[in-house]
Image (cartoon, rainbow, N blue to C red):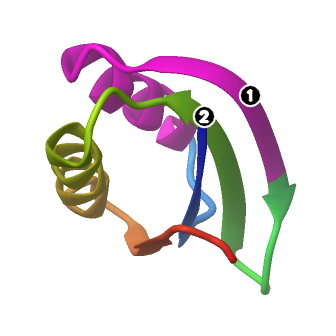
Amino acid sequence: MVDVQVISEARKGIFKDISKVCDDNEIEVVGLNLTDGEPGTSNTLITVEISDMHQMQRLLTALRQIEGVIKVFRPR
């Protein structure tokens, strides 16, 4: 399992978009924590099951292309 942090604009539908990216890439979400960030932003921590680094790279690239996403990274 791998954690991925998504910092985005706080907007309606962001969770749906994140879920769709995971589904489109056949990645199982096993955990989710959505919190308010800085004013106007939200922090989404998703825990996913990843089969290999290629799948991980595809996920990170796809998440970064979502409208309103500011930053995507693996927390330490």
Which residue is more in the foreground, 68 or 54?
54
Q: What residue type is labelled 2?
A: Met
Look at the numbered discs 1 and 2 and tell me whether their residues touch, using CB distance below 8 Å: yes
Query: For the residue carrying disc 2, how many other residues have a C-alpha within 10 Å: few (<14), some (14-19), or many (20+)?
Result: few
Across and down, in percent, residue 30 comes to 67, 19
Q: Give the range drawn in magenta.
A: 13-34
SS category of the residue bearing label 2: loop
Is 18 located above or below residue 20 in the figure? Answer: below
Across and down, in percent, residue 34 comes to 78, 47
| Left or right: residue 4 compared with residue 71 | right
Q: Which residue is drawn at 27% across and 53% down?
A: 66
In what quadrant of the picture does the C terminus appear? Answer: bottom right
Is 23 located above or below residue 7 in the figure? Answer: above
In what quadrant of the picture does the N terminus appear? Answer: top right
Is 58 located above or below residue 7 in the figure? Answer: above
Q: Residue at x 50, y 35 (%)?
A: 13
| Left or right: residue 48 compared with residue 51 | right
Which residue is more in the foreground, 18 or 38?
18
* Precedes in sequence: disc 1 or disc 2: 2
Q: What residue type is labelled 1?
A: Gly
What residue is disc 2 on? 1
Question: Going by the picture, which residue comes out furthest to the bottom?
Answer: 38
| Left or right: residue 75 compared with residue 38 | left
Which residue is more in the foreground, 63 or 2?
2
Q: Residue at x 27, y 44 (%)?
A: 59
What residue is disc 1 on? 31
Q: Residue 70 carries which label?
A: none
Whole-Å distance between the Cαs marked 1 and 2? 10 Å
| Left or right: residue 4 compared with residue 45 | left
